[in-house]
């Protein structure tokens, strides 16, 4: 029997996830309803996808599995409501785990499944393997255009060095993932996913660089455990420019949904 699927969050990510489920995963899931903090957004997406627009509490009650695509600030409340209703939930806004320090402990103390997709990271399984070996170091350097970070004047920031950055690049942040998500909640979800796969928020290092000449967001992940090392570079196209080529983050949700519905489970 197909599971009833609901999506909370009706922005660009929620819309693309919903369309992908209808077009490619309809034999596995029944897209039942969508929800948003703004009822007009939910109604518009519901009409587009031909599903009901419901308040979040009712959606959780009626669906078997919930996809959270709202925001890092809204995610903890959504997850707690799913835990209370004993409904599986997939979290796209993983930054909520760092914003609400008690949430992870609550999740670990219950039997209800909470799934975290790989997002824009290719290689979380490798990070998890290095953790079992004994992870010595884990860092991510993210390069973004200044406007993506809400910056207009970079003159007071120090120049930044790094692979592929321009001479105009400036260092915006250098510290732990725990502090990064508090200062830049909309820009460092990838660091939180790495922290969950690795040794936690405090031990994961984050460098955030603003580069006026960057063509899109780029991530460079470095991990070390003894003599074993892992280096990953992710350079997605901005979502608004090309939804199909961007999208490691968005497509990681349907990839996980397909995996959860399959009798063959691939590690990752």
Image (cartoon, grey):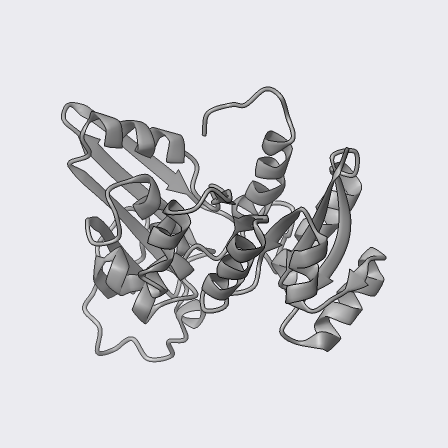
Residue at point 31% right, 70% down?
183
Q: Position of residue 82 (x, y in %)?
A: 55, 55
124 or 53: nearer the viewer:
53
Q: Quadrant of the C terminus?
A: top left
Could you say which quadrant of the image residue 28 lies in? top right
Judge left or right: residue 84 versus residue 107: right
Q: Position of residue 123 (x, y in %)?
A: 40, 33
116 or 170: nearer the viewer:
116
Work out which residue is located at the far top of the displayed protein and give it. 264
Judge left or right: residue 135 versus residue 12: left
223 or 89: nearer the viewer:
89
Residue at point 58% right, 55% down?
85
Could you say which quadrant of the image residue 8 lies in? bottom right
Asked if one can make out residue 169 in the rendered structure from this viewpoint, the answer is no
Above or below 94: residue 264: above
Residue at point 38% right, 54% down?
106
């Amino acid at each position: 029997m197909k599971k009833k699927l609901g999506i909370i969050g009706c922005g660009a990510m929620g819309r693309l996830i919903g369309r992908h489920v209808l077009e490619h995963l309809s034999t596995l899931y029944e897209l039942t309803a969508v929800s948003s903090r703004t009822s007009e957004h939910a109604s518009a997406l519901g009409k587009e996808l031909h599903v009901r627009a419901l308040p979040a509490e009712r959606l959780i009650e009626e669906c078997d599995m919930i996809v959270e695509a709202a925001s890092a600030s809204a995610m903890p409340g959504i997850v707690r409501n799913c835990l209370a209703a004993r409904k599986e939930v997939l979290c796209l806004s993983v930054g909520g785990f760092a914003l609400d320090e008690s949430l992870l402990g609550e999740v670990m103390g219950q039997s209800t499944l909470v799934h975290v997709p790989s997002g824009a990271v290719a290689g979380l399984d490798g990070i998890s393997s290095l953790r079992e070996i004994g992870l010595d170091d884990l860092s991510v350097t993210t390069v973004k255009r200044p406007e993506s970070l809400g910056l207009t004047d970079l003159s007071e920031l120090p120049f930044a060095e790094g692979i592929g950055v321009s001479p105009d690049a400036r260092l915006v942040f250098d510290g732990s993932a725990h502090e990064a998500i508090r200062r830049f909640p909309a820009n460092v979800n990838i660091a939180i996913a790495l922290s969950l796969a690795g040794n936690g928020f405090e031990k994961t290092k984050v460098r955030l660089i603003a580069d006026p000449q960057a063509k899109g967001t780029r991530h460079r992940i470095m991990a070390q455990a003894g003599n074993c090392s892992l280096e990953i570079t992710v350079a997605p196209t901005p979502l608004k420019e090309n939804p199909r080529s961007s999208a490691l983050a968005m497509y990681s949700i349907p990839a996980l949904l397909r995996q959860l519905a399959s009798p063959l489970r691939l590690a990752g």
